[in-house]
Amino acid sequence: MSFFTDPTPYFDEWRKQGPAPVEAPDGNQVWMISRFDDVVQALNHPGLSSAIIPGGMMNHTDPPEHTHLRKPVARAFSTRRMEALRPRIQQITDELLDAWDTEDEVDVISTFAYPLPITVICELLGVPERDRDEVRGLTAELLTMETMVEAYGRFALYVQNLLATKEPGDDVITELRDEPNLVQTLVLLITAGHETTVQLIGNGLLALLRDPVMKQRLLDDPLLIPDAVEELLRYDPPLAEGVSRTATTDVVIGGVTIPRSSQVTVSLGAANRDPSRFPDPDVLQLGRDPHVTFGHGIHYCLGARLARIEGEIAFGTLLRRFPELVLAAEPEWRVSFIRGLASFRVRPKL
């Protein structure tokens, strides 16, 4: 069974070894850090650099550059602003699910999990509606290993053209127009701004449909949904393999010395299934300790609050409107460093 179909056996093996050189799913040799405490230590270690590729994209920079790039974006993605989006997110959710009322079978990914967050992030940023199909296509290519480099160039060119032609408005692009590295920042915000939520909805709904007891608990008590969103984020996160770092000096993690210049992968998915932190980690269970799906420390995901809000509204509305929702076929997993479903067909009603 491949990592992309079921990463759990890989997580278990990595944690047994502790920090150690392994062959990653993409075939590269890396030092894999996979135990929860080691992952938290690694994500905060100044000797593990995020600057693994040139170009100045915020998630691939270190302080002080990272600090300067992150501060204005953090203001633009304030909790207050994200909470104010709830009515619009609910409206988009309802409109998308209206189309399910007359269908015997639908693909969750193409009809709901993708359109919801990409509409939200594009409206928030100020990306024109006419460009959203293009943006979605560029994002998909950017997250596919074979097309990643070429797609980034086309994505950057699209953003440059957008900045040159866009009229000022009440949106994040207008707010950030004078900030450095704006093209790279916008590529990151557009991509990360919806991909996490696509996989939260897809992976999370699949987990719920395979756990009818948990699904029924949420139907009986919708107030549990925010807690369920946290558990679904832990259980099957989009960055399952993890995030990449480079050791700028000899680094000691978990009592093991990782040599300078080593390529390192910090596995968020493996940490989230660490039984020393999460008892019975392969079972959905509410009320657990905090996970590391959104990272930890200075690179903690700026869009985490938005993703949580979208998840709460998406799951709450899905369960309320389609309590009989069931799988129609075995889902198809895509091959990508973002763990997610290529196709996920369900029957809204029995």
Image: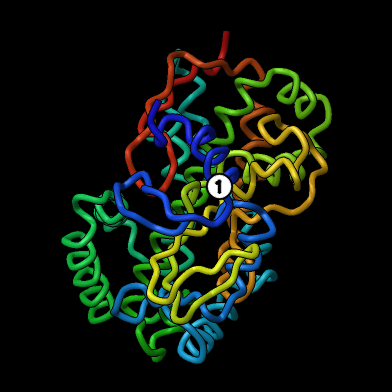
Q: How many marks?
A: 1
Farthest residue, direction top = 350
Q: Quadrant of the C terminus?
A: top right
Q: Is residue 172 visible?
A: yes
Residue visible at 61% across and 20% down in the picture? 210
In the rendered image, which quarter contains the N terminus? top left
Q: Up-down: is 152 above or below 292?
A: below
Left or right placement of residue 314 versus residue 99 in this view = right
Tell me where residue 325 appears, x and y as whole percent. 59, 18
Where's residue 78, x and y in %?
A: 64, 74
- Residue closest to the eye, 259 or 30: 259
Provide residue 213's location: percent of width, then percent of height. Answer: 75, 19
Q: Is residue 117 above or below residue 151?
A: above
Q: Residue at x 27, y 49 (%)?
A: 144
Which one is nearer the viewer's eye here, 46 or 198? 46
Q: Which residue is mark 1?
A: 17
Residue under the image location 52 percent in, 49 percent down: 197
Query: Residue 160: which quarter of the image?
Result: bottom left
Which image quadrant for residue 167?
Answer: bottom left
In depth, the one of 39 and 318 nearer the eye is: 39
> Judging from the image, what secondary structure is the residue with disc 1 in?
helix
x%, y% of residue 298? 60, 76
- Can residue 313 be spotted in the picture? no
Question: Badge 1: how crowded within 10 Å, few (<14), some, or many (20+)?
Answer: some
| Direction from residue 331 to residue 77 in the image, left or right | right
What kind of residue is marked 1? Gln
Tell whether 77 sits left or right of 175. Answer: right
